[in-house]
């Protein structure tokens, strides 16, 4: 489980609590200590089993794609939540680095209007959780995670080579990684299943944990032929 910027294992907790995944070992990756995308991917690969399924949210999904590009033989399948397969334009780097110099709490406050769906804008408990996660990360994490985001490469030319099954989850109201980016990934990945939560924004694991849990559990349901070849699942809006 790979959380996003200024997030920790709590971003996945409601989803995992609802997901029926017997015989699955859950591990949480450390997304806080490396200075660039490849270094973080290498560090996570070094700690992971020989073959595993990365489940990445936001920055975690970006790093999951990095791992799939570096060591595709290690990736049995992959889950990308609120992902972005593109790189960051060079002209945007300075502004992103300047924003990373702010206090993590102020950073979350600034992103809040774009982080959740309109119907969750007044959700004080969700905002408090996001703020507490940001306060809990080690010092310097925001700067390092910003560099991870800025040093990633454009994965679109490589998507066709990532032949493992991939579940792509997105929020219909996501302003940070909008549905068009999820569709782009699903179109480029040979064995992708796309699910969009109609009532969610960027933080769909916390906004719509039931939706994410169902999608993940159904997609991971084992088959007798191939445990890393999950069945296609179909679903509707977040409920």
Image: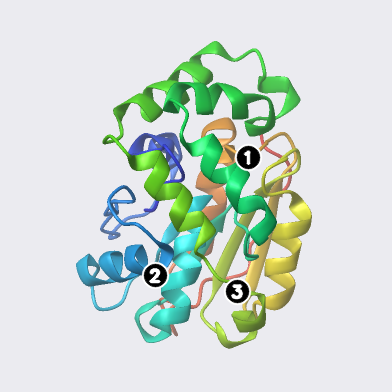
Percent coordinates x, y for residue 81 in the rendering: 56, 53
Left/right placement of residue 71 relative to residue 154 reads: left
Q: Which mark is residue 184?
A: none
Callout 2 environment at 10 Å: few (<14), some (14 to 19), or many (20+)?
some
Residue at 53% x, 57% y is 150
Give residue 231's quadrant in the image: bottom right
Q: Determine the secondary structure under disc 1.
A: loop
Position of the C terminus by quadrant: top right
2 vs 1, front mark = 2
Give residue 183's quadrant in the image: bottom right
Residue at 60% x, 25% y is 110
**Whether residue 117 is situated above or below residue 29 in the rendered picture:** above
Q: Which of marks 1 and 2 precedes in the sequence?
A: 2
Percent coordinates x, y for residue 69 in the rendering: 47, 79
Q: Determine the secondary structure under disc 2.
A: helix
Residue at 46% x, 26% y is 130
Q: Is residue 218 visible?
A: no
Q: Which of marks 3 and 1 precedes in the sequence?
A: 3
Rounded to the nearest whole Å, what is the CA distance between mark 3 and mark 2?
13 Å
Q: Which mark is residue 38?
A: 2
Callout 1 environment at 10 Å: few (<14), some (14 to 19), or many (20+)?
many
Q: Nearer the viewer, residue 74 or 221?
A: 74
Residue at 61% x, 60% y is 168
Q: Determine the secondary structure under disc 3.
A: loop
Percent coordinates x, y for residue 135 in the rendering: 35, 25
Label 3 belongs to which residue? 155
Rounded to the nearest whole Å, what is the CA distance between mark 2 and mark 1?
24 Å
Q: Is residue 173 visible?
A: yes
Left/right placement of residue 236 relative to residue 219 reads: right
Q: How many labels were placed on the picture?
A: 3
Rounded to the nearest whole Å, what is the CA distance between mark 1 and mark 3?
20 Å
Label 1 belongs to which residue? 202
């Amino acid at each position: 489980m790979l959380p996003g910027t200024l997030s920790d294992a709590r971003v996945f907790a409601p989803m995992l609590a609802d997901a029926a995944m017997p015989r699955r070992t859950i591990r949480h990756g450390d997304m806080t200590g490396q200075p660039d995308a490849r270094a973080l991917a290498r560090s996570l690969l070094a700690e992971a089993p020989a073959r595993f399924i990365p489940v990445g949210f936001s920055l975690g999904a970006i790093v999951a794609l990095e791992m799939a590009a570096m060591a595709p033989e290690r990736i049995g399948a992959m889950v990308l939540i609120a992902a972005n397969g593109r790189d960051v334009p060079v002209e945007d780097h300075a502004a992103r680095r300047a924003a990373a110099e702010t206090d993590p709490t102020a950073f979350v406050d600034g992103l809040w209007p774009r982080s959740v769906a309109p119907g969750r804008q007044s959700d004080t408990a969700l905002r408090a959780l996001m703020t507490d996660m940001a306060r809990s990360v080690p010092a310097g994490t925001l700067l390092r995670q910003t560099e991870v985001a800025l040093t990633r490469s454009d994965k679109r030319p490589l998507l066709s080579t990532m032949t493992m099954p991939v579940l792509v989850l997105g929020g219909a109201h996501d302003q940070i990684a909008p549905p068009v980016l999820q569709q782009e990934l699903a179109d480029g990945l040979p064995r992708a299943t796309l699910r969009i939560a109609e009532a969610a924004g960027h933080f769909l694991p916390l906004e719509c944990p039931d939706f994410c849990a169902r999608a993940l559990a159904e997609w991971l349901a084992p088959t007798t032929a191939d445990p890393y070849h999950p069945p296609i699942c179909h679903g509707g809006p977040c409920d």
